[in-house]
């Protein structure tokens, strides 16, 4: 049922797309993803009862949901307490039971004195009472009565002696079986002329090596003491699924062998599927839904490639080619076409437990999958993975005979299939119909069809977008009728809030916003309240984001009383953690819109800075950082009550907690006046310099961010930065390791550029210029990127002649030694030359020689980069009065107009354009009259 589908989901691993110092970015939604990217169930469904309705005693109310949440919490706390005591060794250890000696096969039991006196003596297997008809361990072959008796004539079984003669043959079924006694391993030989039954000739099970296989085999060995039989190493290997059928006996024809699992022992059954074929059998309609998106896509690609690459028949070739002028050639002698089934992506493997060579026959199930056209006019084709949701549309039934509910369900299915798989006109019409008839269909019927479809693991991004649009339109029409289904909708939509796709997050926020407006604040709070103190952090994270969206839709003031109660909860630290996280998400989502309510929000979360739980203190500091970032550059007065606690926190905390407190201080310093900013910067810099050498990558990112924010403030003096910060900064951060991570790369360059804005460009360039000749190319790129940004912002006025020589020498070396032509080197070279201006004239011959040599390189990327560099420095060359050199470069580029690569040709044309722009058409060499005829063929070439 749809409710089961909604609830039968495993929770996704906790992920947070917004960066936090202790969490990594989620990579889950790739149809992806997505082995575990199935949406999670936040909590069990609950019912919202209107005041005019009589409460259903079976309905699960808000009270029930809270009671179950409390029970789960108590259970988890008890388990944690037990584990804690066990780790400390406080749990009492019970004495282990003394192991009994293994009894040998022929051991004799010696009775004790008590047993001889009055105790009950344990009976042996040899002391069977003869009063009750039973079967002994050593009786005659079953099915044969004594020779003096008429077969089948005995009404009651006689008392048997252990060594009686072999009885005569009995006709099966002529006697009424006696009360079954103890089963014997010798009772299992099948009777003559009798078809095996389930209790005699069954499928082999765990029996001994000498026993006849049967379904309910007795595992006892006939020993005097009647002990349990020890498993032999030659016993049958256990199997989780029986592959074959019953063992064919003497009088049992093969065709009558019972079939178990669809296979007979002579390999004449159906192609195995599911677990029997290791889950990779040729897909059938029932298995399509169980495929992951990657498997489904691989199967589609293989099927499409097989169809495209199939050999053409003679009839098809005759239809393609004219009758005259062509003949059929024979293949060369010894030609062997490549046919390797192993190259297929999803080829059916050999079934487990069946050996031997078999031809892989054509599978008719693929044709069944192809035949999935729903009945009716103008119906789109149904995909294989859609069968579990739209199966009823494949049934050709008379709709007049269906009940009104079934007709409504079928109508909704039809419209959803058209929206999901139809053409744009079909989709537009179906979307309009389902919107207009939303109240007629009813919320229950609509959401029971839409929500399971949205949770499909094979749903593509475009299809999800369309279904989300359906929910959006339907919510607008249903209005307050949607209240009983708020929880079901949140189960499906909340995971979109942490999706890595930006547009998916926007869609999720839009749906929850419209849902809050339709259902109202009271319904939203009562629905999500049990999830606030949920033990699963993933649930609390998505709930906090959903509450932030509700606050943006209904206004922050309406949510402030609820937030105050949650953040001051004494009952659960999880509730306090979630409440403070809601404040953080409100600040991130709404930005400067929190300014009117900033003081109230700070007062709500400030007690979390001294909470007993480390996680609560950390999330409080992060929330204050988010509030300060949203309020920048205003609102420092609202944070007066937390400055002292933050200051004490950075001195008391270490690790992740310290990172969060430093982040909060870093966002508060830019809000202060100059005097306060200078004081707090000097005080916090002691801790920052200590953390420069921290091996934690997340701590390094936060330290870089705080240093950047401190240097941005006007109250910090340049001399203090030069003397106290720069030596430690370059020693600990400008390393090869920082260049490997792209996020570290960008953060380090941005912080260094901000420091350069305070202390001057020459101070930074002089410390980096020697690293342009470093052996590590990635590190050279980071240095070039930083120099480019510093000189682009500040110019080269404070760079002396010695530093100028080092700089030109370094950029020439870095430009020539690059193995992967990167735009960073090209941009850096151009910016350095442009910044130096006329001072670069002595170096132009060397630069042009490098360009000409690289224009003649066999690698297209190298030629393209050299031509691009000409366009970057042409203006500087003209400023240096190097028109002769420019004319020479123009002639060289003119000769390269026959370039075969379009990208390189475009760069050459760009270089020619830059030369013409700076020296003019009259001085251009070659003359324009020679240049234009060479350009005409290029203009006519539509591929250039």
Image: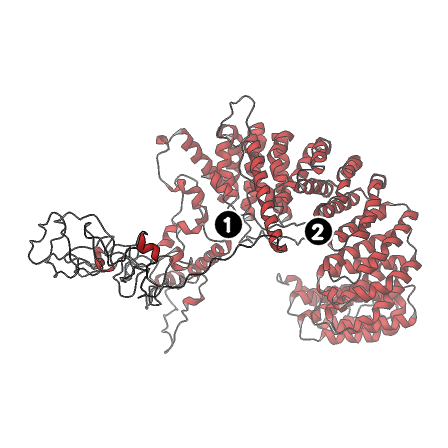
Identify the residue under disc 1.
458
Dot 1: element: loop
Question: Is 864 drawn above or below residue 639 in the view shown?
Answer: below
Question: Is 317 drawn above or below residue 562 in the view shown?
Answer: below
> Residue 409 is drawn in which quadrant?
top left
Quadrant the N terminus occupies: top left
Residue at screen point 72% across, 60% down: 697
**How far is disc 1 from disc 2 in space, using C-alphas?**
30 Å
Question: Is 871 drawn above or below residue 479 in the view shown?
Answer: below
Is 346 left or right of 686, judged from the image as shown?
left
Report the mark closest to the observer, 1 or 2: 2
Residue 828 coordinates in the image, percent (x, y): 79, 65
Dot 2: element: loop
| Numbered badge on residue 20 | 2
Could you say which is closer to the camera, residue 592 or residue 242? 242
> Residue 141 is drawn in which quadrant?
bottom left
């Amino acid at each position: 049922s749809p409710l089961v589908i909604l609830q039968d989901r495993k929770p996704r691993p906790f992920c947070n797309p917004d960066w936090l110092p202790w969490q990594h970015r989620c990579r889950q939604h790739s149809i992806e993803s997505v082995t575990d990217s199935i949406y999670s169930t936040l909590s069990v469904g609950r019912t919202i009862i209107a005041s005019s309705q009589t409460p259903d005693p079976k309905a699960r109310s808000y009270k029930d949901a809270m009671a179950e949440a409390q029970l789960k919490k108590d259970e988890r706390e008890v388990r944690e307490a037990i584990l804690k005591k066990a780790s400390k060794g406080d749990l009492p250890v019970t004495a282990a039971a003394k192991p009994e000696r293994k009894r040998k096969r022929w051991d004799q039991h010696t009775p004790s004195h008590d047993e001889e006196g009055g105790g009950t003596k344990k009976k042996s297997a040899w002391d069977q009472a003869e009063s009750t008809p039973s079967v002994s361990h050593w009786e005659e072959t079953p099915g044969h009565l004594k020779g003096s008796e008429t077969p089948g004539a005995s009404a009651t079984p006689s008392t048997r002696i252990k060594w009686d003669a072999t009885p005569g043959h009995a006709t099966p079924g002529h006697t009424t079986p006696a009360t079954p006694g103890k089963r014997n391993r010798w009772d299992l030989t099948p009777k003559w002329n009798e078809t095996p039954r389930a209790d005699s000739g069954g499928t082999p099970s765990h029996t001994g090596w000498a026993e006849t296989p049967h379904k309910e085999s007795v595992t006892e060995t006939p020993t005097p003491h009647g002990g349990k039989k020890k498993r032999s190493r030659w016993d049958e290997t256990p199997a989780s699924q029986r592959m074959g059928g019953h063992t064919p006996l003497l009088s049992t024809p093969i065709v009558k062998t019972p079939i178990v699992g669809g296979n007979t022992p002579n390999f004449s059954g159906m192609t195995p599927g599911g677990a029997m074929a290791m889950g990779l059998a040729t897909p059938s309609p029932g298995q399509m839904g169980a495929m992951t998106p990657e498997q489904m896509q691989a199967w589609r690609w293989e099927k499409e490639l097989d169809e495209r690459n199939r050999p053409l028949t003679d009839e098809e070739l005759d239809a393609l080619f004219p009758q005259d002028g062509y003949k059929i050639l024979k293949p060369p002698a010894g030609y062997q076409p490549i046919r390797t089934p192993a190259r297929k992506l999803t080829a059916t493997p050999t079934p487990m437990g069946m050996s031997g060579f078999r031809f892989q026959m054509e599978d008719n199930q693929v044709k069944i999958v192809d035949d999935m056209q729903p009945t009716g006019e103008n119906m789109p084709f149904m995909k294989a993975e859609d069968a579990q949701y739209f199966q009823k549309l494949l049934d050709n039934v008379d709709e007049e005979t269906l009940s009104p509910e079934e007709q409504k369900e079928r109508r909704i299915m039809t419209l959803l299939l058209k929206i999901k798989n139809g053409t744009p006109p079909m989709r537009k019409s179906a979307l309009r119909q389902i919107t207009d008839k939303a109240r007629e269909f009813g919320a229950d019927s609509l959401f029971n069809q839409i929500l399971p479809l949205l949770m499909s693991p094979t749903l593509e991004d475009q299809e999800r977008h369309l279904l989300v649009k359906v929910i959006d339109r339907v919510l607008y029409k249903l209005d307050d009728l949607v209240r009983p289904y708020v929880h079901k909708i949140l189960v499906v939509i909340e995971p979109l809030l942490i999706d890595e796709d930006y547009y998916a997050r926007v869609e999720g926020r839009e749906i929850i916003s419209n849902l809050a407006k339709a259902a109202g604040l009271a319904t939203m709070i009562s629905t999500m309240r049990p999830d606030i103190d949920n033990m699963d952090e993933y649930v609390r994270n998505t709930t906090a984001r959903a509450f932030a969206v509700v606050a943006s839709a209904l206004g922050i003031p309406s949510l402030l009383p609820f937030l105050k109660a949650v953040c001051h909860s004494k009952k659960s630290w999880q509730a306090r953690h979630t409440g403070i996280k809601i404040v953080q998400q409100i600040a991130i989502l709404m930005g400067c819109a929190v300014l009117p309510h900033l003081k109230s929000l700070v007062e709500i979360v400030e007690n979390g800075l001294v909470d007993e739980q480390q996680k609560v203190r950390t999330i409080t500091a992060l929330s204050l950082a988010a509030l300060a970032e949203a309020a920048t550059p205003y609102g420092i007065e609202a944070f007066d009550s937390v400055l002292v606690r933050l200051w004490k926190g950075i001195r008391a905390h270490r690790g992740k907690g310290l990172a969060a407190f430093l982040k909060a201080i870093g966002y508060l310093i830019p809000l202060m006046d100059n005097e306060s900013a200078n004081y707090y910067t000097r005080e916090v810099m002691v801790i920052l310099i200590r953390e420069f050498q921290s091996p934690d990558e997340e701590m390094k990112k936060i330290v870089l961010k705080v240093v950047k924010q401190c240097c941005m403030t006007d109250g910090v003096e340049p001399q203090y930065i030069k003397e106290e910060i720069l030596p430690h900064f370059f020693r600990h951060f400008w390393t090869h390791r920082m260049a490997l991570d792209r996020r570290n790369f960008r953060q380090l360059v941005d912080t260094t550029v901000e420091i350069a804005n305070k202390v001057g460009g020459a101070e930074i360039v002089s410390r980096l210029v020697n690293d342009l000749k470093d052996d590590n190319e990635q590190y050279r790129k980071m240095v070039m990127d930083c120099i480019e940004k510093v000189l682009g912002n500040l110019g080269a006025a404070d760079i002396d002649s010695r530093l100028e020589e080092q700089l030109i020498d370094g950029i020439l070396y870095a430009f020539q030694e690059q193995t992967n032509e990167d735009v960073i080197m090209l941009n850096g070279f151009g910016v350095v030359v442009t910044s130096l201006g006329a001072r670069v004239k002595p170096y132009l011959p060397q630069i042009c020689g490098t360009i000409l040599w690289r224009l003649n390189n066999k690698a297209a990327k190298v030629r393209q980069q050299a031509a691009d560099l000409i366009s970057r420095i042409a203006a500087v060359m003209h400023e240096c009065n190097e028109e002769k050199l420019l004319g020479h470069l123009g002639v060289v580029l003119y000769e390269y107009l026959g370039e075969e690569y379009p990208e390189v040709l475009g760069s050459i044309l760009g270089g020619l354009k830059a030369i013409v722009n700076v020296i003019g058409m009259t001085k251009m060499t070659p003359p324009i009259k020679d240049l234009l005829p060479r350009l005409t063929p290029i203009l006519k070439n539509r591929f250039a």
